Amino acid sequence: MKSRFSRAVGRILYAAASRLPRTYSKIKIGQRRLRAFCAERILSHCGEEVNIDRKAWFASDVSLGDCSSIGHRAYIEEGTYIGNFVMMGTDCAVLTRNHSYSRTDVPICVQGMEALEPVHIGDDVWIGARVTILPGAVIGDGAVIGAGSVVHGKIPPFAVAAGNPCKVLRMRADQENS
């Protein structure tokens, strides 16, 4: 378990590191290593060779696997598990909570939040730009999620899925046999 001090130091350093140039910019001043250093102090688990891109925001209760990335301006809520070798595009959002709205006699803004529903992203997943992943979603190993998709429920392993709502278009294994 990481100490509060270690997490606080990580957050303070990350405030500056998140403003450095994007990882794949022509300007190389150690931004990838510095953001990974901060992530090691902040995240509940941080794998080896991770990439946190510019202006990403992530909760401390996030697990990030080896050789995985959190994309430019991504927003990752607590209770998210990201496997190994995951690529994430720009402006992705992973949500694990929703507002309560069942009562009609009370304004939604004062009804509070639903219970946390963890999100699980398997190994070797490619998440396109501006994908929104909703509470409780599970994305199987080897899946590809098309840009702009809204993911809820389960996406099976090796599926190519896209849309709002996100639906399986084909399986990756089918492409190899074509």
Image (cartoon, rainbow, N blue to C red):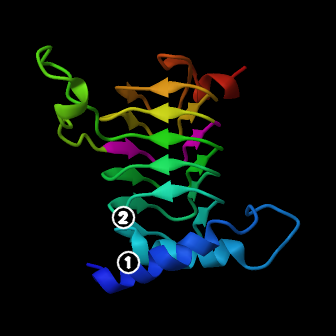
Specify the quadrant that holds the C terminus.
top right
Residue at 62% across, 22% down: 174
Q: Residue at x 73, y 79 (%)?
A: 30
> Separation of disc 1 and disc 2 at Cα?
8 Å
Q: Are marks 1 and 2 in contact (CB under 8 Å)?
A: yes
Occupied quadrant, residue 125: top right
Between 81 and 18, the residue placed more toward the observer is: 18
Q: Which residue is mark 1?
A: 7
- Observer-nearest residue: 93 or 144? 93
**Whole-percent x, y for residue 106 in the image:** 13, 22
> From which residue to which does the magenta span run?
119-129
Q: Nearer the viewer, residue 165 or 138?
A: 165
Which residue is denoted by mark 2 in the rendering? Answer: 60
Q: Is residue 123 visible?
A: no
- Give the x, y percent position of residue 67: 58, 63
Looking at the rendering, which quadrant does residue 83 occupy?
bottom left
Is residue 133 left or right of 149 when viewed as pictured?
A: left
Q: Amino acid at mark 2?
A: Ser
Residue 121 in magenta? Answer: yes
| Label 2: element kind | loop
